[in-house]
């Protein structure tokens, strides 16, 4: 193979390990350092920042990281590509120019803009939106790099775009090199969440070296000219890169086999994952198709205010204590309760417990209302003023905090031709990036034939004894990908874990639409549970509002498994 382009990641979210930039720059050879700082909730936070100060709206952490590491990146010849610009990539670029002057380096800094549709909210039907950002692809990034940029900051681009852009520019790919572009999307999807590709949040973490998992390293994609890539990490860093850790990340927050991006639609049912050496996993065979003609737009609006408080109920009469609190809080609200009052009792208590904590249950009260006062001072008073007049052993985990704004997430789609995509080059020149000339409407993929059913002596075991899972949020929906580690395990999954069976195992999904997608190349089944998370993480009332633990709940459930399927370490 030709020499690959080494693309590392240093951030999977706004708040990830601060030192990762320096660790990645000093840990070994790199050509490009990328970082993902944006999520649906982050856009809401940045939108609120701009209400206070229009000059903000970007990830301030990245600016501090560059103050500490920009000179190091330039010295190592590493170009930096991040989406930390958020709602104000031009503002971040200006601030970075100031940082470069401050630390005494000559850095060529560019940015990509056009994703922010707030000025045209009325035109597109996004009235009242706090943020409205189209997901752009990687060609604006490629143009900035082609013009010699050392640092490229963007607003809302797809998570994989920060890998697609550098790879396309470096290898000179054409706009219709679908398979190569799709391979870069697959690599970008694996490394964009940082240490999740190196053992973080991994279902079989107990099989990894305990000491190495104390501080997992961040991932690297060594991308080749044909679009294939090795997923790896710097030598000597923690964690592990295995078929399992990479498969888990491939299944994270996806839908069906067709994974749409602005530059290409990647066929996840064609990706081959293979271990080549310790901490080296090859992604190959990925096929691509033209992208859809529309771009996804993520909009957030302020949907009122929220608050919550959690009561600790200890010992006997848990249900009765809970009813007493509910009645007292309702009485305190009087004739003007909040618009929504949601109670959840978690029976974490054990009989004849050895510790007081093990004898206690948690009663959670969530309130939502357009009026901040109703879920602020009024709610706090309703919870606290009953402290000496309620159930025996009254206690709370903490007093309710001040009311916080609640965001509502809604996805939309607009024609790509209607969204400007502008690369602002290091010299200030503005280059318009044309929308794709060849598009293809998304269509469902025919489900592959089911493998022969597995027949064997059944044993009552947790699903996770044989299968891994990774789950996450997709707006108001959630996905949970379940994978096997043997062909026999996949055969059992494909035949037994149907949508109806999933609803039986997860009662919270019993009345919700559920899609199932078979991915035999990954030995996996992916489910999308629609409407599980209300209108996005900021408005969700579930105990786990981002569905991050949904897969682990599923793995803990007892099912009839053929005994020879588990355990099978790998």
Image (cartoon, helix red, strand yellow):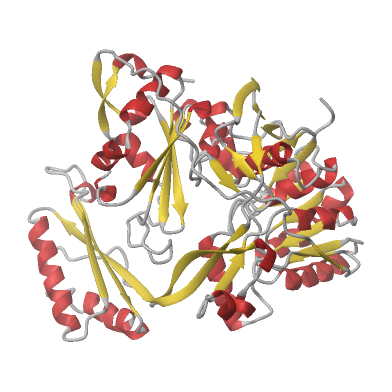
Q: Nearer the viewer, residue 316 or 84?
A: 84
Q: Is residue 205 left or right of residue 333?
A: right
- Total marks in image: 0
Residue shown at the point (36%, 62%) measured from the top left = 534
Q: Is residue 154 left or right of residue 478?
A: right
Residue shown at the point (41%, 59%) measured from the top left = 476
Relative image position of residue 518 (x, y in whole percent)? 45, 33
In the picture, residue 247 is in which quadrant? Answer: top right
Can you see residue 560?
Answer: yes
Q: Nearer the viewer, residue 377 or 230?
A: 230
Q: Is residue 149 left or right of residue 295?
A: right
Relative image position of residue 234 (x, y in whole percent)? 71, 35
The relative height of residue 492 versus residue 291 in the rendered view (above or below) is above
In the picture, residue 111 is in which quadrant? Answer: bottom right
The relative height of residue 351 versus residue 566 in the rendered view (above or below) is below
The relative height of residue 346 versus residue 412 in the rendered view (above or below) is above
Residue shown at the point (24%, 76%) measured from the top left = 384
Relative image position of residue 543 (x, y in whole percent)? 32, 56
Relative image position of residue 318 (x, y in whole percent)? 11, 56
Q: Nearer the viewer, residue 261 or 213?
A: 261
Image quadrant containing the N terminus? top right
Can you see residue 22?
Answer: no
Q: Nearer the viewer, residue 200 or 466?
A: 466
Q: Is residue 266 left or right of residue 378?
A: right
């Amino acid at each position: 193979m030709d020499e690959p382009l080494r693309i590392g990641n240093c951030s999977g979210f706004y708040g990830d390990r601060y030192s990762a930039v320096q660790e990645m720059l000093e840990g070994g050879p790199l050509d490009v350092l990328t970082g993902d700082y944006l999520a649906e909730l982050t856009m809401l936070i940045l939108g609120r920042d701009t209400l206070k100060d229009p000059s903000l709206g970007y990830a301030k952490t990245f600016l501090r990281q560059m103050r500490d590491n920009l000179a190091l990146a330039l010295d190592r010849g590493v170009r930096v590509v991040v989406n930390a610009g958020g709602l104000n990539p031009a503002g971040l670029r200006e601030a970075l120019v100031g940082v470069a002057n401050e630390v005494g380096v000559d850095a060529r800094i560019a940015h990509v803009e056009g994703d922010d549709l707030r000025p045209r909210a009325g035109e597109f039907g996004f009235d009242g939106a706090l943020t409205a950002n189209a997901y752009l692809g990687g060609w604006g990034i490629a143009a900035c790099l082609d013009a010699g940029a050392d640092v490229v900051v963007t607003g809302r681009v797809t998570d994989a775009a920060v890998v697609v852009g550098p790879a396309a520019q470096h290898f000179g790919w054409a706009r219709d090199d679908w398979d190569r572009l799709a391979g870069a999307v697959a690599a970008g999807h694996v490394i964009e969440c940082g240490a999740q590709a190196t053992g973080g949040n991994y279902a079989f973490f107990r099989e990894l070296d305990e000491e190495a998992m104390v501080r997992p390293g961040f991932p690297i994609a060594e991308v080749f000219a044909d679009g294939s890539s090795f997923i790896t990490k710097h030598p000597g860093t923690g964690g592990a890169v295995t078929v399992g850790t990479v498969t888990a990340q491939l299944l994270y927050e996806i839908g069906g086999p067709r994974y749409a991006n602005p530059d290409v639609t990647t066929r996840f049912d064609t990706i081959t994952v293979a271990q080549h050496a310790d901490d080296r996993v090859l992604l190959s065979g990925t096929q691509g198709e033209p992208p859809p003609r529309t771009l996804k737009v993520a909009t957030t609006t302020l949907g009122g205010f929220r608050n919550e408080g959690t009561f600790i109920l200890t010992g006997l009469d848990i249900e009765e204590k809970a009813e007493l609190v509910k009645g007292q809080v309702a009485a305190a609200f009087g004739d003007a309760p909040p618009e929504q009052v949601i109670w959840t009792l978690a029976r974490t208590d054990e009989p004849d417990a050895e510790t007081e904590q093990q004898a206690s249950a948690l009663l959670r009260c969530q309130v939502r209302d357009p009026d901040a006062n109703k879920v602020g001072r009024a709610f706090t008073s309703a919870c606290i003023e009953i402290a000496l007049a309620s159930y025996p052993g009254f206690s709370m985990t903490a007093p309710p905090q001040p009311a916080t704004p609640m965001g509502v997430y809604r996805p939309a789609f607009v024609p790509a031709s209607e969204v400007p995509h502008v690369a602002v080059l290091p010299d200030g020149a503005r280059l318009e990036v044309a929308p794709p000339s060849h598009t293809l409407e998304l269509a469902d993929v025919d489900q592959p034939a089911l493998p022969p059913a597995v027949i064997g002596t059944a044993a009552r075991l947790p699903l996770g004894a044989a299968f891994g899972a990774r789950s996450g949020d997709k707006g108001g929906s959630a996905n949970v990908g379940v994978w096997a580690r043997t062909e026999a395990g996949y055969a059992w999954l494909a035949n037994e874990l149907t949508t109806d069976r999933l609803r039986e195992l997860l009662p919270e999904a019993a009345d919700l639409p559920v899609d199932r997608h078979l991915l035999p190349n990954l030995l996996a089944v992916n489910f999308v549970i629609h409407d599980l998370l209300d209108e996005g993480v900021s408005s969700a009332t579930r105990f786990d509002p981002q569905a991050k633990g949904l897969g682990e709940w599923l793995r803990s459930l007892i099912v009839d498994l053929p005994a020879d399927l588990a355990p099978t370490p790998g």
